[in-house]
Image: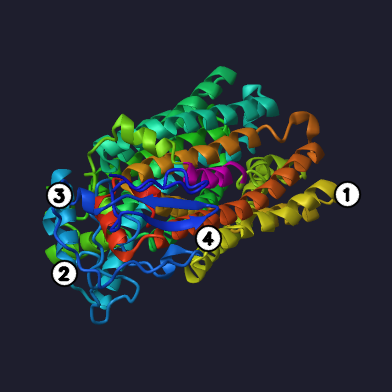
Amino acid sequence: MSLPVHPTGLGRDTVDPAISTSSSNSLANDDNLNIELSDFSAVESSRPSFPRLSTKMSYQPLSSTDPDEQKNYGSLDTTPPGSPTALLGESLRIEDSVPDIENPFLDTETAEYWRQVYENCQYECRHVYNPKLEWSAKEEKELVRKLDWKVCLWACVMFFGLQVDRGNLGQAVSDNMLDDLGLDTNDYNYGHSIFLVSFLLAELPSQLVSKAVGPDRWIPMQMVLWSFVAISQCALTGRGSFLLTRSLLGFLEGGFIPDLVLWLSYFYTSRELPIRLSYFWTTLSVTGIITSLMAFGLLRLRGLFGWEGWRWLFLVEGLITLCVGVASFFMMPASAVQTKTWFRPNGWFTEREEAIVVNRVLRDDPSKGDMHNRQALTPARLWEALKDYDLWPLYAIGLFAYVPQSPPKTYLTLTLRSLGFGTFDTNLLTIPADVFHIMNLLLITRVSEWLNERSLVAIAQPLWTLPCIFALRFWSGVVEDRWGTYAIIMTLLSYPYCHAILVGWCSKNSNNVGTRTVSAALYNMSVQTGSVYASYIYRDDDKPAYRRGNTALLAINLVSILVFLLTKIYYVWRNKQKERAWNALTEEQQVEYRRTTKLQGSRRLDFRFAH
């Protein structure tokens, strides 16, 4: 027996098990939903007997605005295939505990099911899984602080290593690198595009390798390999060597960011991750400030041993990344229970702290333990993740949202030089935008957390850049008034960066380890695709005002605003569809669905999309 579900547009949200208690039962009858139930009693004798679950905490309809409003962690949206998601037990309310964290494992059937899942996949933390473990809010606060110092801080240091080598080309060209190598602006664009395409193509393969060998091994290897290429840029001789190093850097750096996000997800809950990612991307601006100050000194070495200043820049900054990469082999434990090793005999955590770290993450999302950290994705699971069309709106945002500010950022030092600023002043004048960028990034991410809202907060980014792009396109004083032009560009580049919100949003709506691994790469690939076409918007024949280029940026900015609004509308609509289908089931049928469905992640009827 089966339960066919034929709601218009519901697509994948079909219900597998037979769950009817009458010979003919129509649960819903409207334009979008037509669920016909077969006789449940006819299959009772042929169906395996399941233990009866408590229904004292049966499903309560979620708000269509956001699933976090009433989320019982793990009970509604985090179950892998075949789960008897009996997440209906009494919540564990710990004295002095964080009020919005509940324990989905108090029901014995649920706890035993997940114990078996963790055992079958050889989840590395399974030995500390404890459904009855309790801890205080004070303990958790102190532990999260320790995680921030041990895990998040080093993630920021590694991102610093990435951004040093990824962003120093802009400082190098301020020292006449293009003239020294016989290159022009179009060669610079081409080299930047080759880097981005290589970066993009490496994203998914890098994620698959990282999932198979572990991000704690793969990320340090990546950093050491690309640091050698970064150092070799000090020996560039012309166009060929310039394009070759750009391509190699892109291939080796590609996938680094989603790899690191995957590692962070082992330690933080879904509510904590976006804030930590905001710290992570704050490093982008901090690196810009530090490297601008470094460039101020290093570029003054022009003439030392016959080298141009930009050659010293590549050499020194490449060596910095090499040191960070080597240190990362010793600073990245595979998991919270694997911090003890020969060079760190006491580890980072006590046994109790290890248990708290693991159980708080699992109670937030039980599926985080349905694969171990050295387990590769199968082709079938990869394909399922690739065709998850409910995540495509987020990829569309990545394709457009970061384009309007990209050319002004890429050409910042060249633009400042064309305005008449000297080499050293140019690098110092980039710092104010980085400072305000940090403040706005942290602010927008916090506001998103406080309001529990993603799309309508993240849309602040294109709304911020719109008037700045409009001014660059239509103001007659662009270039002519150098301080006015500088003020507009600094305001534009101080935009509230929504990337941390989007990455956390994508992770949340993925809802299982396999999809999360792939979606992180696909989202970043969409961002890099946007960067590729952004690199061709400012052309040599359009400078110095780039009127044609800014017209294109203005149009893309408007499209970006529209995509944010449509994404909001789409997820609200999808949640309403799922809500109707779910409410059409009786309480007993909902229990049976959770017990027997083979659908997983966002495909489940009891999952609600964040927006």
Q: Which mark is residue 133?
A: 2
Residue 42 lies left or right of residue 255; in this view the side is left
Q: Disc 2 residue type?
A: Leu
**Mark 4 lies on residue:** 454
Query: Who comes first in sequence, dot 1 or dot 2?
Result: 2
Q: Position of residue 574 (x, y in %)?
A: 50, 53
**Mark 1 lies on residue:** 476
In this rendering, which labeled residue sits more in front, label 2 or label 3?
3
The boundaries of the magenta stretch are 389-400
Work out which residue is located at the far right of the displayed protein and give it. Answer: 476
Residue at 32 percent across and 36 percent down: it is 381
Secondary structure beneath dot 1 equals loop
**Mark 3 lies on residue:** 45
Query: Quarter-wise, where is residue 350 in the image?
Result: bottom left
Q: Position of residue 302 (x, y in %)?
A: 58, 35
Is any atom of residue 320 visible in this view? no
